[in-house]
């Protein structure tokens, strides 16, 4: 399935660097081919690097392991 951009925000690491993060949602299919009720949400930096959601406003850069916090 195709991921659709549904949001954008900035996050900051402990050293003060700012990261632009894009939020995507992807519909999933059930075994019978029907759409699942909840889409999968994924996060990536604007340059394409994967970002893991740790909960609340906490995220982690998958490649480097740097923790970033969403800026309100």
Image (spheres, grey):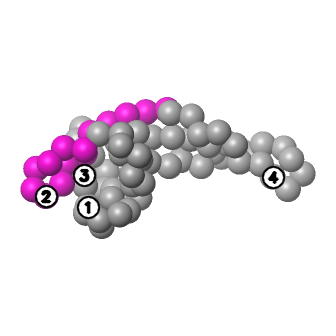
Mark carried by residue 69: 3
Q: Is residue 62 left or right of residue 35?
A: left
* Left or right, 50 with reference to 26: left
- Chain-order first, disc 4 or disc 1: 4
- The residue that label 4 is drawn on is 30
For the point 35% across and 63% down, the residue is 63
Crowding around mark 2 (Cα neighbors within 10 Å: few <14, some 14 to 19, many 20+) is few
The quarter in which the C terminus is drawn is top left
Q: Is residue 62 magenta?
A: no
- The numbered dot on residue 53 is none
Q: 57 left or right of 15?
A: right
Which of the two discs, 1 and 2, labels the residue nearer the N terminus?
2
Q: Which residues are magenta?
A: 6-19
The residue tagged with tag 3: helix, strand or loop? strand
Per the model, the C-alpha gap separating discs 1 and 2 is: 8 Å
Residue highlighted by disc 1: 67
Q: Identify the residue position indicated by label 2 in the image.
A: 14
Residue sitting at the far right: 32
In the rendered structure, which disc, 4 or 2, sits on the residue that comes first in sequence? 2
Residue sticking out furthest to the bottom: 65
**Residue 42 locus on image (x, y percent):** 50, 49
């Amino acid at each position: 399935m195709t991921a659709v951009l549904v949001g954008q925000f900035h996050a900051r690491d402990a050293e003060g660097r700012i990261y632009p993060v894009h939020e995507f949602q992807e519909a999933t299919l059930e075994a019978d081919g029907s759409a699942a009720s909840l889409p999968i949400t994924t996060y990536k930096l604007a340059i394409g690097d994967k970002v893991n959601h740790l909960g609340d406003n906490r995220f982690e850069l998958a490649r480097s392991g740097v923790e970033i916090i969403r800026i309100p």
